[in-house]
Amino acid sequence: MTTAFIHGNIVDVINETLIKDGTVVVEDGIIREAGTGVAVPDGAAVVDLEGRTVTPGLFNCHVHMCSDAGTGVRERISQAAQTIRALGNLKTLLNSGVTYIRDAGAPSYIDVDIHNAQMTGTILAPEMQTACRCICMTGGHGHSEGREADGPDDCRRAAREQLKAGANWIKVMATGGVMTKGVEPGSPQLTEDELRAAIEEAHKAGAKTFTHAQGMEGIKNALRAGVDSIEHGFFMDDWCFDFMKAHDVFYVPTLAAPYWIKKYGTGAGIPDYMVRKVENTIEAHMDTFRRAHKAGVKIALGTDAGTPFNKYDKTAFEAVLMVRNGMTPMEAIKCGTLNAAELLRVKDSHGSVTPGKKASFAVFENNPLEDIQALMDCSMTVLAGEVVFRK
């Protein structure tokens, strides 16, 4: 099937320009032509975008699809109910222009079953990569649903278990965090040797690794151990930035996660220990992001969706926060498209509106290059050439 999307203003993230009044021709889910002066093929279906702005489909590189984005109070809920919730969250992501996600940890390997259903077309959802259960120390951050492991040998075994279950990524917990009671964001948890054992197993299998890492000592442990992506990164210095650039390590800052906790606070039912930890770290987090950007660290967009009031229709708000903290709108859009595709190793097939790539893109009422807030108002989502959402 051939479809021509006409009269769209296309954000060209490769050349960092806006192609005005462009056409995107899609054949069998692949972009065949994109730009101005493109003829509509005979017999093609035509979708008139009426001057709206087209971007590559957005990525969210840090999602917890099974979570409820509620108050953060631990709940008791069946696996079936978690799965049903996840399907709803995935639909919401699609309807906000998100066509690709990386899930950062789910209970009971629900993410693997959902991923398999997405790949076979059983469900309609963004494309995805998954991590199964995070690997944490006994009693460490994420222990309620993670795989507790102690010592390098146990961490190695834990990584093998996640790979056997179907994980595309191995997630390791280098520090404490906001959401777990009794741990602190700045405190190191898995040791460098423990982290290295899990990371080595992932790399042997061709998988990549990412780490929940907020305090500087834990971040440095993870970097030296060979991790591929730092998540959150509240406290980092120039050594971290230099190391990340030299070793091609990405930063996924998730600025939105603490933002919403601070915004809603204990008055909305968020536990006071979570609010306290955010209030003690949020300024350092934003400062680290600004310095990492200035230093030239590779940054990809992820929100930690599912944490308190961090809703699944708000992926683009991360780009808003990035612009508030020093990025240009084009830089922020690239974090959520081309950069994210590179992090997830799909840059050859995703991340830009380019001939030969998969026809997954989002359409917005207004131009986010003029006002990044426009990225919050998705009017159409196209997934592999099919219109899956239209406002």
Image (cartoon, helix red, strand yellow):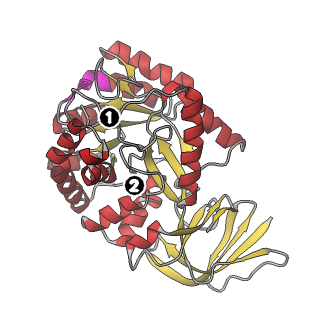
Query: Does any portion of residue 231 appear in the rendered image?
Result: yes
Q: Earlier in the sequence, mark 1 or mark 2?
A: 1
Mark on residue 301? 2
**Circle 2: element type:** loop
Q: Nearer the viewer, residue 214 or 305?
A: 305
Q: From which residue to which does the magenta span run?
A: 188-195
Q: Position of residue 357 (x, y in %)?
A: 62, 61
The Cα atoms of the two marked residues, 1 and 2, are separated by 21 Å
Dot 1 corresponds to which residue?
Answer: 226
Residue type of the residue flagged with mark 2: Leu
Instruction: Tell me if 280 is positioned left or right of 159 in this view.
Output: left
Q: Position of residue 194 (x, y in %)?
A: 30, 21
Q: Which quarter of the picture shows residue 350?
A: bottom right
Instruction: Tell me if 331 is positioned left or right of 118 in this view.
Output: left
- Reply above or below: 295 against 4: above
Residue type of the residue flagged with mark 1: Gly
Local crowd size for mark 2, using a 10 Å CA cut-off: few (<14), some (14–19), many (≥20): many
- Reply above or below: 37 against 350: below
Q: Which quarter of the picture shows residue 291?
A: bottom left
The residue that appears at 53% across and 81% down in the rendered structure is 19
Mark on residue 104? none
Quarter of the image containing the C terminus? bottom right
Quarter of the image containing the N terminus? bottom right
Q: Position of residue 381 (x, y in %)?
A: 60, 63
**Circle 1: element type:** loop
The residue that appears at 35% across and 44% down in the rendered structure is 308
Local crowd size for mark 1, using a 10 Å CA cut-off: few (<14), some (14–19), many (≥20): many
Specify whether residue 194 is painted magenta: yes
Specify whether residue 98 is painted magenta: no
Query: Does any portion of residue 236 appear in the rendered image?
Result: no
Q: Position of residue 282 (x, y in %)?
A: 20, 50
